[in-house]
Image: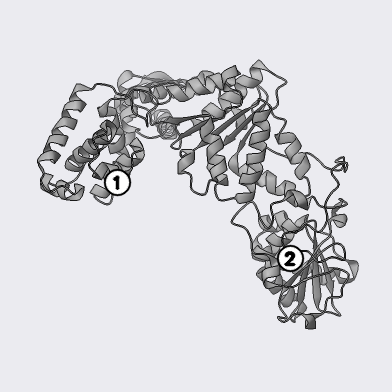
Amino acid sequence: MSITSSTQSITARIAERLAGAVGQRKFAMWFDQSARFDFKADQNALTVSVPNRFVADWIGKHFQGDLQSAADSEAGCSVQLSVQVSPQDFGAATPPVADLPSNDHAHAAPAPRFGDSVAAVSSSSSINPAAAPVPRHLSVLASDDSTVKPHEPAVRRPQNAPLSHLQPVVMSRPVPRGSAGRKMRHRLEDFVVGPSNELAFAAASRVADDDAATAGHPLFIHGGCGLGKTHLLQGICQRHLSREPGAKVLYVTGEQFTNDYIAAVRTNKLDAFRNRVRKLDLLAIDDIHFIANKQATQQEFLHCFDHIELGGARVVLASDSHPKLIKQFSEALVSRCVRGMVVQIHEPDTETRERLVRVLAERRNMVLQPSAANAIAQHCDGSVREIEGVLTKLHALASLTGSGSSSRLGGITEPIGHTLVDRLFQHDAPRTRKKPIRFDEIAKTVSEELQIDCGQILGSSRNKHVVLARSITIYLAYELTSMSYPEIAGQMGRKTHSTIITAAKRMKKQIETGEAMLLPSEATAVTPKELVDRITRILKRG
């Protein structure tokens, strides 16, 4: 931070007090390299110089109170605050404010304009406390003699201005093949494929292999946590790099993309940021839902999205939810996402989980007897991370009890049987709900899993998919609650319970028959038993 020599002591104390109030991380981000303090003791005035309007708006919205308090405490009186936009003090002739959405930022809804509550005065004018109706306010000063207007940039950078002074924005870069970097540790060859994820794997493989049909069409993968979305995204990047070593590939999280965009705006390096992102051959963004409520970041990503696709490059995104179900996702962004292929990863079935257990155990140099692998698969009915956690504890238990001799590589050389697995699980707290399952919770879960409106389930539609969802709801309500058929009928809005009994019997027969069927919400054919078991696990986990 640059501090004038005449007031070095008091400005240093103000900065120290401010850092203590807002935290070192926020202070380093918004003040350490992006603000310069100038305190005039004879006027009791503190001027904060910043590189652009974006930083000025952010400081005014989030730190005005802390800044005022720090200045007043150190000066021993009421201090007049002002923020001066002075890009020339930060190594750039003019800030690229024309590139920024008006009064917007990347972390929340648009900030209130300073002009709505405080005076905007010229930097050529003297700071006169008497000119303001409220003595404690924050003024925004332009770097020239004109007043900064809310929706007009004070200055604009010439289109042909040189960018040699800009340094590349640091983002998460792809790790070269064979590197030990943790950012890109997954490969498609290691992905365990099953009915719950085979469509997502096939789509990912096509993108990674540069299939011509995927050019210009994004791939959007969604599903619960720990089901393999990150594995697929990193696998796509790794395979693409192995096929084309010179390709420009970027894997990044939604949070990192947001942070890098903010850093580019804050340091007047937005052109460098755009130049790097828009020239990629493959862009993979994990947890894209992170930008859902960030209007400016969404707008910037949308422009990058369009630019990349027009050039024939690939865009791969991953999220916990379908793009249409992500709240505060802009309509334009949802439209771009669903224009390509949207695939869902479901929780793996028992057979796939058992294969996962064996594969993950082999990577730890552990040998499991079939009964032990099956017991772990039955116990871990959630994500892959849960299986990894159990295997970690099992490895430790086997080493401590001497159930298997350790190899030179730290593995367990003797097969681990069912007895040790049972011993491991007996220490786990039973995973039971604290509250009983309610009918409306069952209906909501069925609605979300089958992607059918809850009103249709409780209605009278005879669509075969709606009828199936209704039958599952009735069946689970009878099996998982203490409700009788007449009570279920009342919840369903039926006058008699005869149709409720018929639906429950029909569902039970379909489960016993086990005939696979195709549903709009499923990537592949699924049996009624698989559907019911999956929904039951979700409900029991609460």
* Residue 361 quadrant: top left
Which residue is nearer to you in this view: 101 or 366? 101
Please name which of the two marks, 1 or 2, marks the residue nearer to the observer. 1
Residues tagged 1 and 2 counted as in contact (Cβ below 8 A): no
Q: Position of residue 76 (x, y in %)?
A: 75, 81
Tell me the residue at 26%/49% (across/down): 440
Which residue is labeled 1 in the image?
455
Using residue 365 as the reference point, say whether residue 152 is left or right of it.
right
Q: Amino acid at mark 1?
A: Gly
* Residue 307 quadrant: top right
Mark 2 is surrounded, within 10 Å at the Cα level, by few (under 14), some (14 to 19) or many (20 or more) other residues, namely some
* Residue 54 quadrant: bottom right
Mark 1 is surrounded, within 10 Å at the Cα level, by few (under 14), some (14 to 19) or many (20 or more) other residues, namely few
Q: In the rendering, which numbered label is found on residue 107?
A: none
Using residue 287 as the reference point, say whether residue 392 is left or right of it.
left
**Is residue 519 something one can see in this rendering?**
yes
Which residue is labeled 2 in the image?
16
Tell me the residue at 69%/45% (across/down): 261
Which residue is nearer to you in this view: 262 or 436? 262
Q: Amino acid at mark 2?
A: Glu
Q: Position of residue 137 (x, y in %)?
A: 71, 75
**Is residue 364 something one can see in this rendering?**
no
Q: Position of residue 441 (x, y in %)?
A: 29, 47
Tell me the residue at 25%/28% (across/down): 529
Q: Position of residue 328 (x, y in %)?
A: 52, 49
Looking at the image, which residue sits at the far bottom?
A: 130
The residue tagged with tag 1: helix, strand or loop? Answer: helix
The residue tagged with tag 2: helix, strand or loop? Answer: helix
Tell me the residue at 52%/18% (across/down): 189
Measure how far apart labels 1 and 2 are at the Cα level: 57 Å
Q: Quadrant of the N terminus?
A: bottom right
